[in-house]
Amino acid sequence: MKIGVLALQGAVAEHIRMLEEAGATAVAVKKVEELDELDGLVIPGGESTTIGKLMNKYGFVEKLREFGQAKKPMFGTCAGAIVLATRINGQDDVHLGLMDMKVDRNSFGRQKDSFEVALPIAGVAADYPAVFIRAPHIMEVGAGSEVLSKFEDRIVAARQGHYLAASFHPELTEDIRLHQYFLTMVKEYYGEKASV
Ligand SMILES: NC(=O)CC[C@H](N)C(=O)O
């Protein structure tokens, strides 16, 4: 299984380390052509506006949309979740517009700009150590989506088929369970493809 981590900006090396620990081959993706050989893609946290600009500049937008539309699993963390969303609160333009959800940026108050909590995540863990850094939350998800976790009554992790989104930074802990969960989504994708 070969998983890419979009390496335009943000916490790339940490995701690669976690994916490898979880049993995948993981590579940093800097060129559009590199997407062809991947079974799944992680879009890391960072700054969504910057990632969006760089995606445009290096011609990633169309190719990433094709990647998602081909049902290849994609996992957006923090800014990466914003990049995946079809709606961004207070903004007219979106980035990839693939995962049916509305996100709100920087939504956890000032004194809480950065914090860690033990979160229950459905199907993943009862006590996942989630690190929030100027994190977005998910205001609503579309039909057919699954809310995986809430914090203070706000959705902070969700799945829609082959798309996975988390408000927090799973790569900044030593806990590989969410990356393992993503790898099971990639295996499911292959299982489905094999049965067609
Ligand atoms: N840690 C992060 O990825 C922060 C996301 C950032 N606040 C944004 O809106 O893009």
Image (tube, grey):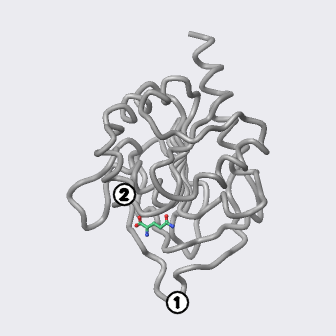
Q: Find disc 1 in the rendering and name its residue.
A: 111
In the rendered view, would you say 75 is above or below 115?
above
Question: With 173 as the anchor, is 83 left or right in this view?
Answer: left
Question: Which secondary structure lies at badge 1?
Answer: loop
- In the orientation shown, which residue stands out farthest toward the bottom? 111
Q: Position of residue 102 (x, y in %)?
A: 36, 57
Q: Position of residue 196 (x, y in %)?
A: 56, 9
Asked if labels 1 and 2 touch by Cβ distance under 8 angstroms, the answer is: no
Give the number of marks: 2
Question: With 76 as the anchor, is 115 left or right in this view?
Answer: right
User: Quarter-wise, where is residue 68 in the image?
Assistant: top left
In the rendered view, would you say 59 is above or below 171?
above
Residue located 54% across and 73% down the image:
133
Depth check, front residue: 11 or 160: 11
Give the amino acid at mark 2. Lys
Q: Position of residue 83 (x, y in %)?
A: 39, 52
Residue neighbourhood size for the residue with mark 2, other residues' Cα within 10 Å, grouped as few (<14), some (14–19), many (≥20): some
**First in sequence: mark 2 vs mark 1:** 2
Depth check, front residue: 176 or 2: 2
Residue located 62% across and 38% down the image:
27
Q: Position of residue 165 (x, y in %)?
A: 52, 52
Question: With 86 as the anchor, is 2 left or right in this view?
Answer: right
In the picture, the quarter occupied by the N terminus is: top right
Which mark is nearer the camera, 2 or 1? 1
Question: With 118 as the anchor, is 57 left or right in this view?
Answer: left
Residue located 34% across and 61% down the image:
49
- Using the image, tell me which numbered label, if any, was put on residue 102: 2
Question: Which secondary structure lies at badge 2?
Answer: strand
Which quarter is ligand 1 in?
bottom left
Tell me how far mark 2 sits from mark 1, CA to CA: 24 Å
